[in-house]
Image (cartoon, rainbow, N blue to C red):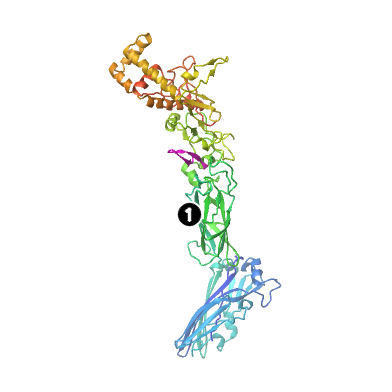
């Protein structure tokens, strides 16, 4: 007959939420005459389901008492706790070739298999029994620690054999108290406090006239580990949210997060433990649109969502809640982004098969709410973008972009707005673009193609201008999908350039006394009304008048080269002679491409007028009057002289190709301001 007895094992005192288990491994080596056997057995113990041998007045179950006490170390001295044999593992061998084995079928239930020659027999725990109601060992709390006792030595016996178990201490002619005394462990308070590392070994040999048995007992402590969960977001360090700049109803990108159940403190070790996983999205932003200017119209939808199609292995109960369909030891959740500045936090709840909540960790931090995107640097802006832009430490409403030499700081857009971005013209197509954090930015509506962003950036020392379609603005405002507009709450506006082709009626400029000057439109190549981006009402350019000017200059040059008559014509002819022969200059004149010259002049004019919109004034002569040739010729605010017009017509040489000037009199560069 197969008898299992164990010595015992005790469990850690400090962890009340995990059921303690006593484990004992013992080896019996017996001899009698020429016969011998060995038996190795380990039994684990768990708290009984009811009190046996008295409860000391404590109500409820031993497991409940232990939980309230906070673990074995919390049991008050004088109290004791019953444990039942919950698991079995072992085997035995006899010198006659017989053998035996025991395995666990369930908590307290085991199967013994015995073999001798060709004979095999099995025995299982009676199914009608309730092992958890029967004490197999007891834990006694003392003032100095504890004692584990009341267990019986046992062996894995192949009962069919003649010699297996032929000598056993409980059947030998020895003092029974000697065996009982050996079958106990004394545990100190210090060992209780460090129970998880307890490993105690004791051994002895019992003898009588029939033979001897050597017994080695090893006590170890084990705590039932429900495991814990680790979050593994993929490419988390680099992930930046996106919206869909073509279809706002579709996500722009997604973040995948893997979760794994593993033994506590061992994230790299696989585990067969399983848990029900529930995923929650919390603190999710609900920004209108997907970026600052698309689409038009407000939306209350969450910017981060669980989608059914992207989570086929989960039960998606709402856009912010998803659950595993069964208990699993690993899972993956996909979080879809619907905004270029979407933000939220992922919380994961994991429960084992007993309904216990498992700890959920990310990089060692317990029960975290994972920020999406990663924003350890603060402000619900992706760390990856902040780092790439050198924007660490800048506040969400930061608007202090600066170019050396310019008085105005900022451009009317906050850091958060630049991060979220907007749709602009990129290589002829409408496309979302995030702004550079520390660059001054400017927006221009230019359907006719008069404005050159590259020339503007060069002239302004680094102010980046973006072209955009007016359909992506509201009354020229480009950040209409912002709850907190920049520019002191006024919002950021684009400047519209109107190219007035063909015959245009006069748009008179009134003098201070109310008189109208009809010639204003006839000679004015362009004009501006409103001298900040926000207040600008009109920026008009007249390419026909530019070409007419070039045609007039062309006729004048021909006259000056072939038949100068007036004093002015003779002066001009003398100067032209320094540039080349009459024949050379006439050939250049005939070959002058007026269309290309007109386009070049129109581009310079657009930069000039945009300078007015952004706070600069015309160059003035010594008397403070606007005059041709006043100021630095490299500055776009410079007006061409009669010589400049002729060099431009003949050679294509055009002034205004450098920086806005910073002279002692003219301070065009210093005054540039795209913020207002």
Up-down relation of residue 543 to residue 178 (above or below): above
Q: Residue 525 appears at what percent x and percent y?
A: 46, 22
Q: Residue 4 appears at what percent x and percent y?
A: 55, 81
- Which residue is painted at 36% across and 21% down in the image? 649
521 left or right, relative to 565: right
Q: Say which quadrant the C terminus sits in.
A: top right
Task: Residue 322: say if magenta.
Answer: no
Up-down relation of residue 294 to residue 675 (above or below): below
* Helix, strand or loop status at disc 1: loop
Q: Tell me the quarter of the picture where residue 600 sits.
A: top left
Q: Which residues are magenta?
A: 420-436
Q: Crowding near pointer 1: few (<14 within 10 Å), some, many (20+)?
A: few
Can residue 657 be seen at all in this image of the molecule? no
Q: Which residue carries the number 1 mark? A: 234
Q: Residue 584 appears at what percent x and percent y?
A: 28, 19
The number of numbered discs placed on residues in the rendered structure image is 1
Q: As rendered, which of 234 and 241 lies closer to the eye? A: 241
Q: Say which quadrant the N terminus sits in.
A: bottom right
Task: Residue 427: say if magenta.
Answer: yes
Up-down relation of residue 669 to residue 169 (above or below): above
Q: As rendered, which of 575 and 568 lies closer to the eye? A: 568
- Which residue is painted at 42% across and 32% down in the image? 454
Q: As rendered, which of 292 and 24 lies closer to the eye? A: 292
Q: Residue 80 appears at what percent x and percent y?
A: 65, 73
């Amino acid at each position: 007959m197969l008898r299992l007895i164990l010595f015992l094992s005790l469990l850690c005192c400090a962890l009340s939420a995990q059921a303690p288990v006593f484990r004992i491994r013992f080896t019996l080596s017996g001899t009698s005459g020429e016969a011998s056997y060995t038996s190795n057995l380990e039994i684990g113990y768990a708290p009984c389901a009811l009190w046996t041998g008295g409860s000391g007045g404590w109500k409820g179950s031993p497991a409940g008492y232990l939980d309230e006490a906070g673990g074995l170390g919390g049991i008050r001295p004088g109290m004791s706790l019953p444990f039942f044999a919950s698991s079995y593992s072992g085997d035995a061998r006899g010198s006659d070739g017989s053998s035996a084995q025991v395995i666990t079928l369930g908590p307290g239930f085991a199967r013994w298999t015995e073999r001798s020659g060709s004979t095999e027999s099995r025995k299982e725990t009676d199914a009608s029994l309730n092992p958890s109601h029967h004490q197999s060992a007891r834990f006694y709390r003392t003032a100095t620690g504890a004692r584990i006792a009341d267990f019986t030595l046992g062996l894995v016996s192949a009962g069919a054999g003649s010699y297996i178990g032929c000598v056993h201490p409980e059947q030998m002619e020895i003092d029974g108290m000697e065996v009982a005394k050996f079958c106990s462990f004394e545990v100190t308070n210090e060992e209780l406090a460090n129970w998880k590392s307890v490993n105690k070994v004791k051994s002895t040999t019992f003898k009588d006239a029939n033979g001897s048995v050597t017994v080695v007992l090893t006590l170890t402590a084990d705590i039932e580990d429900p495991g814990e969960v680790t979050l593994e977001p993929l490419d988390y360090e680099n992930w930046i949210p996106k919206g869909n700049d073509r279809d706002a109803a579709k996500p722009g990108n997604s973040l995948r997060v893997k979760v794994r159940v593993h033994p506590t403190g061992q994230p790299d070790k696989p585990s067969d433990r399983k848990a029900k996983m529930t995923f929650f999205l919390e603190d999710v932003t609900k920004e209108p649109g997907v970026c600052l200017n698309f689409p038009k119209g407000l939306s209350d939808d969450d910017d981060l969502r669980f989608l059914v199609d992207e989570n086929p292995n989960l039960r998606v109960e709402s856009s912010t809640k998803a659950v595993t369909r069964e208990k699993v030891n690993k899972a993956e959740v996909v979080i879809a982004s619907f905004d270029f500045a979407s933000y939220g936090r992922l919380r994961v709840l994991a429960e084992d098969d007993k309904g216990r909540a498992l700890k959920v960790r990310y990089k060692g931090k317990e029960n975290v709410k994972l920020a999406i995107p990663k924003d350890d640097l603060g402000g619900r802006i992706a760390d990856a973008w902040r780092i790439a832009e050198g924007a660490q430490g800048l506040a969400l409403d930061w608007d202090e972009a600066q170019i050396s030499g310019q008085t105005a700081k900022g451009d009317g857009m906050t850091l958060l707005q630049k991060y979220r971005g907007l749709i602009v013209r990129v290589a002829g197509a409408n496309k979302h673009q995030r702004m550079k954090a520390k660059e001054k930015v400017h927006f221009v509506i230019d359907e006719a193609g008069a404005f050159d962003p590259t020339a503007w950036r060069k002239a302004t020392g680094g102010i980046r201008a973006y072209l955009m379609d007016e359909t992506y603005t509201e009354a020229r405002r480009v950040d209409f999908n912002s709850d907190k507009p920049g520019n002191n709450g006024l919002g950021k506006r684009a400047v519209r350039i109107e190219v007035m082709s063909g015959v245009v009626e006069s748009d008179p400029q009134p003098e201070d006394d109310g008189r109208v000057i009809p010639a204003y439109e006839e000679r004015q190549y362009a004009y501006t009304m409103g001298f900040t981006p926000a207040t600008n009402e009109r920026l008009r350019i007249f390419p026909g008048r530019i070409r007419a000017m070039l045609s007039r200059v062309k006729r004048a040059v021909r006259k000056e080269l072939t038949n100068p008559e007036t004093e002015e014509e003779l002066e001009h002819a003398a100067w032209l002679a320094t540039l080349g022969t009459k024949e050379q200059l006439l050939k250049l004149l005939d070959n002058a491409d007026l269309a290309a010259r007109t386009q070049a002049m129109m581009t310079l004019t657009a930069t000039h007028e945009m300078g007015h919109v952004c706070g600069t004034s015309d160059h003035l002569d010594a008397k403070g009057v606007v005059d041709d040739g006043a100021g630095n010729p490299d500055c776009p605010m410079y007006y061409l002289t009669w010589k400049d017009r002729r060099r431009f017509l003949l050679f294509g040489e055009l002034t205004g190709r450098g920086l806005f000037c910073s002279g002692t009199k003219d301070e065009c560069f210093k005054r540039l301001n795209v913020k207002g």
